[in-house]
Image (cartoon, rainbow, N blue to C red):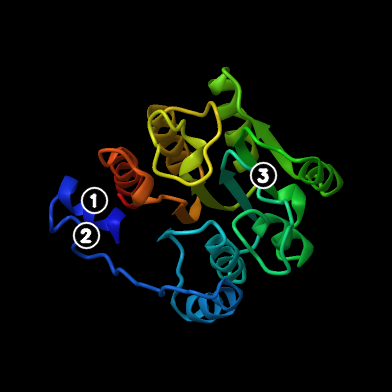
Amino acid sequence: DKIISCYKKRYGKKSLFGFNVLKIGDFEDIKKQHASNYNILLSKVKAGDVFLGGDHSITYSVFKAIKKTHENCGLLVFDCHADMHVLFDFISHQDWIYYLVNNKIISGKDIMVFGIRDLSKQEKGFALNNKINLISYCNDIYKMMGKVLNFCKKYDNIYVSFDIDVISSRYAPGTGYTKKGGITPLFAYKILSELKSKANIIGFDLVEVNPKLDKNNKTLDIASRIVNLMIK
């Protein structure tokens, strides 16, 4: 809701005219969230939809629903974490990729995680064993961009999941699990623009924006710009 409010403030109250805004709901019990989300999404989701979180675990249900009707589909994740570290007996923001692979919803080789700055030993082993493509953050951002675009060329369809913490907290402080380093907002806009022009993006989500941790709406402003880029 905060992202949409910021979007309307920046681009005008009528900026979302013609778009169908579906609120799936708020879930106090994360264990029940995925079954509820998935059942709703199966009947509602369509190619080109943009989803806003919230917790990164929403991507599990969203991607599962979209993948059901789209073959030869790759998953591209922007995140400073690998999200494969299992601590609980239910899907959470830090292990949803593990469960996508473990539950055979997608093969590891069809996943790329871009911008990693935090990787546990467990995650590294799981990624290697399942041939998941990991792109660690480095200063040569255009080399990183080339790897992303080459990955996308292999698929008829690409689903993109964007965790706001892939951007440096210097620019986007409004998120719960920050790590030193990260890409700039300008690079984020550039690579997403490239993807829009060169890949068939069948779905996009923007997650882990926490307005309570934001400063002067810096993160919300970036989030609204990303949303505008992806829906136009």
Quadrant showing the N terminus: bottom left
How far apart, in angstroms, are the residues tagged by discs 1 and 2?
Answer: 9 Å
Position of 79 relative to 19 (above/below): above
Position of 124 relative to 17 (above/below): above
Eye-nearest disc, 1 or 2: 1
- Look at the numbered disc 1 and give the secondary structure of its residue: helix
The residue wearing badge 2 is: 16
Quarter-wise, where is residue 175 in the image? top left
Disc nearer the start of the sequence (3/2): 2
Residue shown at the point (59%, 57%) measured from the top left: 93
Q: Looking at the rendered structure, which numbered label has been put on residue 7?
A: 1
Residue shown at the point (57%, 68%) measured from the top left: 61
Q: Looking at the rendered structure, which numbered label has been put on residue 62?
A: none
Within 10 Å of disc 3 (Cα), the crowding (few <14, some 14-19, many 20+) is many
Amino acid identity at mark 1: Tyr
Residue shown at the point (31%, 45%) measured from the top left: 220
